Image (spheres, rainbow, N blue to C red):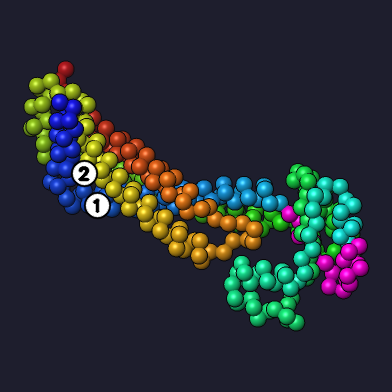
Amino acid sequence: MFRYRIKKVWKESWQNISRHRFLSIISWLVAAISLLFFSLLVVLLLNINHFSQQAKENIQIQVFIDSTADQPRIQALEQGINSLGNISKVTFISKDEGMKQMVEHYGEAFEMLEGDTNPLYDQLTVEVADNSQIQATLRQIRQLPDVFQATYGDEAADSLLSGLRGVQVTGFIILGVTLLVTGIILFATLLMSIKTREEEIRTRTLLGATRGYVYRPFFLQSVLLTGLGGLVAGAVALSGYRRFVTNWVRIPAGYNWLDFSTLVPCIIGANILLAIIIGGMSASLAVRSSIKYPK
């Protein structure tokens, strides 16, 4: 009996879709576009959280050494920094090593700056013991001799996160509009399906069919359209992330994008959940507004 009911609901759902193919295709397309924006926002939010965690774990101070400083003065500066409180590690990086790191991170375009044309400074990378005291430590380092410039390494990440949050706000606005349009079009599609079967549904209700019995085929119809749109949207978003973001978009050294394998279950799961919510709400509104039950 249970298997028969499932088969019947499934059959009725596909019949509803095939009867109104044009509206069903439009509903699927709009749902796919909406869920594509949603997928991209989920990717963005997860990466913002990922960058924030990396920023907390990898806080460093970059100390650029005056170009006139010789080796004894550099060693004296390193000793001076080590003598300060809140210092856990100091690492010297020559300008040649720094340029090599830039070439590895940003590409071969920087190779022309290697050698005598290298514009970088020798630097000391300072790791602190207590991140909450980093600003005080930074002020102390800036007052030491032969310090050309000292910067808080998290400033680049703050700038990156600020830009991503700006994109996030715009994305939420676009997502809200597209989800609203998706709901309206799904609602219209379901209304057409209900109108087509109005006499059949009225007969069923007179014979004692419950609201849930009538509701289930339309719920499944709506979820099928949004769910298929969500799967396509998730595939497009993940493919774009893998090919475009991880290969073309550069981020500050020391940071990395969220691993692709971590995103897959998050995006697919979130899309399916949202598809069920949108589909369920649209079907519920359509059934309640169109079908009158005898009192």
The x and y percentages for residue 254 are 64, 58
Label 2 or label 1, whichever comes before in sequence order: 1
The x and y percentages for residue 84 are 88, 51
In percent of the image, x 85 and y 58: which residue is there?
A: 142
**Circles 2, 1 touching at the beta carbon (< 8 Å):** yes
- On the question of residue 187 being in view, the answer is no
Q: Is residue 24 left or right of residue 177?
A: left
- Secondary structure under the numbered disc 2 in the rendered image: helix
- Amino acid type at circle 1 is Ile
Give me the disc on residue 204.
Answer: none
Which residue in the protein does label 1 denote? 26
Q: Is residue 165 left or right of residue 98?
A: left
Say whether residue 71 is magenta: yes
Q: Please state which of residues 295 and 41 is positioned toward the viewer in this rendering.
A: 41
The x and y percentages for residue 55 are 65, 50
Extent of the magenta region = 60-76
Q: Please state which of residues 154 and 208 is positioned toward the viewer in this rendering.
A: 154
Which residue in the protein does label 2 denote? 189
In the image, residue 51 sits, relative to residue 3, either above or below, namely below
- Secondary structure under the numbered disc 1 in the rendered image: helix
Say whether residue 278 is magenta: no
In percent of the image, x 78 and y 56: which residue is there?
A: 126
